[in-house]
Amino acid sequence: MTAPADDFPCNEFVEVVTDYLEGALAPEDARRFEEHLALCAGCASVLDQFRTVIRASGRLAVSDVDALTPAQRDQMLAMFTDWAAPRR
């Protein structure tokens, strides 16, 4: 998949996705983020994955991984394993 021709490259999108979900982006950056999201199915999928993890864990911060119950951790690992599996 080719990245959209915009001023917000995919690698920058991935770097700020948690800031976006926490509402911590400056308004101009949030606008650019959302414009990129509308053009890039790959980044829309990444955002969906982040939201799925948040719903499964009930948390957003990576530092809270140690606080997950074993069942939450297993569920998250299964989601990522399924997501990362080669598409057939």
Image: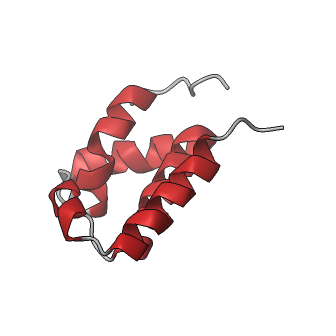
**Front residue of this view, candidates 37 and 11:** 11
Residue 42: percent from left, percent from top: 59, 39
Image position of 68 (left or right of 40): left
Looking at the image, what colour scheme do you see?
Answer: secondary structure
The residue lying at 49 percent from left, 67 percent from top is 75
Q: Can residue 62 be seen in this view?
A: yes
Image position of 74 (left or right of 25): right
Quadrant of image for the C terminus: top right
The residue lying at 57 percent from left, 28 percent from top is 4
- In the displayed structure, 85 sits above or below 23; it is above
**Front residue of this view, candidates 75 and 38:** 75
Residue 24 figure quarter = bottom left
- In the displayed structure, 26 sits above or below 60; it is above
The residue lying at 38 percent from left, 65 percent from top is 73
**Front residue of this view, candidates 22 and 58:** 58
Q: Can residue 40 be seen in this view?
A: no
- In the displayed structure, 25 sits above or below 61; it is above
Q: Which residue lies furthest to the front in this view?
A: 70
